[in-house]
Image (spheres, grey):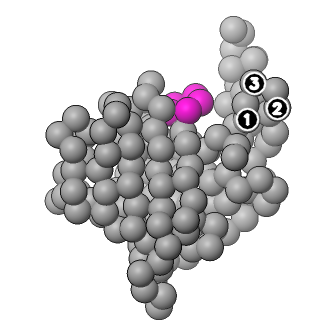
Amino acid sequence: MSVVALTTLSACGGGDADHWDEFQPRPATATDLANQTFEFRDFSYGAVFDASLSSTPTRLAFLGPTAADAEWRLPFALTARAATSSGTATLAGDQLVLTFQTTDPVLPFTTATPIALRVTADVNDGRIQLVNTETGVSQTSAPR
C-alpha cells in the first residue's frame, strides 16, 4: 500500500469493507456512551488504551449511568484477547476517564492507573473517537 493511500485511510474516521467516511466530530455526551458498545478493529486497534493492544481488536462497552451530576459515571467493560477488565468511567466535558476496578492479568491494566481520554462523537453514525491524553494515540470506533 502506498504512503498516499495510508495517509488517506488514516485521515478517514473509519469504516468497514464497503464504506469509508470521514469522522465529523461533535461533543460526546453520556447519552452517546450509555448502553453502547464500541469496537476498535481498524488501524491502531486498541492502542488508544495501551500500546500492547496495537494489533488487537478491542471492545469498550458501557452500561447506563449510576449517577448524574457534574460528572457522569458509567460502568464499563474493556475486552481484548478474550479477557475483560471493568470499572467506572467518568465523563466531564470531553474528558473520559476509565478507572479499573477489576483487571484480568492477560490485559495490561491495573486498578492504580486510570486512563484519561478525550472523546468526541460522530454527527452521523454513532462512532466515537478517543485520544489518549498521555500518549496522543487517537482511534475511531468501527461503524455500528
Q: Which residues are magenta?
A: 41-45
- Which residue position holds label 2? 19
- Look at the magenta stretch and give its main secondary structure: loop
Q: Residue at x 64, y 41 (%)?
A: 142
Disc 2 marks a residue whose amino acid type is: His
Residues marked 2 and 1 touching at CB (< 8 Å): yes
Residue 5 sits in quarter:
top right
Q: The residue tagged with tag 3: helix, strand or loop? A: loop
Q: For this rendering, which residue is in front, 34 or 72?
A: 34
Residues marked 3 and 1 touching at CB (< 8 Å): no
- Which residue position holds label 3? 17
Residues marked 3 and 2 touching at CB (< 8 Å): no
The label shown at residue 15 is 1
Crowding at mark 2 (Cα within 10 Å: few <14, some 14-19, many 20+)? few
Asked if residue 36 is positioned above or below residue 106 in the image, the reply reads below
Which quadrant is the N terminus positioned in?
top right
The label shown at residue 111 is none
Distance in Å between CA atoms under marks 3 and 1? 7 Å
Q: Is residue 51 visible?
A: no
